[in-house]
Image: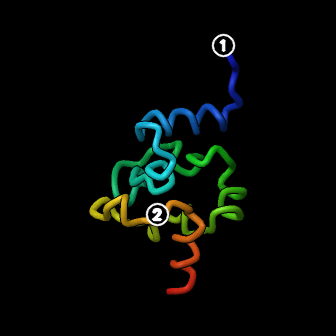
Amino acid sequence: MKLLTPLKAIRANCLECCDSSAKAVAYCTCDGKNSTACVFWPYRFGKRPETAAQKYGAAMLNPAEMPGPGVLLESLPTNPREWAASKARVA
């Protein structure tokens, strides 16, 4: 059995929760604004929130800027950076 670091274990948990869909994990609605709050939500990328914000954009870690539960997952970009960049252009 391979031991995981705490951040990798959180990522594995999030993937299991979202049926192994990395896209569903990125746009997870359990942010406390769109759905019930999950304590793992800020760590769902398997990185510290500060590192994830630098890599994917701050919009991916701000519940107010995340797409709501009514948005179809298929309509969102596969790369979370594209979503964050589009939110930055609007602001």
Q: Is 32 in front, or is 22?
A: 22
Amino acid type, residue under disc 1 in the picture: Met
Amino acid type, residue under disc 2 in the picture: Pro
**Callout 2 crowding tier (Cα within 10 Å): few <14, some 14–19, many ≥20:** some
State the residue at coordinates (31%, 61%).
72
Marks 1 and 2: which is nearer the front? 1
Q: Position of residue 28 (x, y in %)?
A: 43, 52
Please, what secondary structure does the residue beneath circle 1 have? loop
State the residue at coordinates (55%, 85%).
89
Q: Is residue 7 left or right of residue 84?
A: right
Q: Earlier in the sequence, mark 1 or mark 2?
A: 1
Residue that mark 1 sits on: 1
Q: Is 81 in front, or is 67?
A: 81
Q: In this view, does 2 lie to the left or right of 29?
A: right
Q: In which quarter of the image is the N terminus?
A: top right
Residue that mark 2 sits on: 63
Distance CA(mark 1)–CA(mark 2): 35 Å
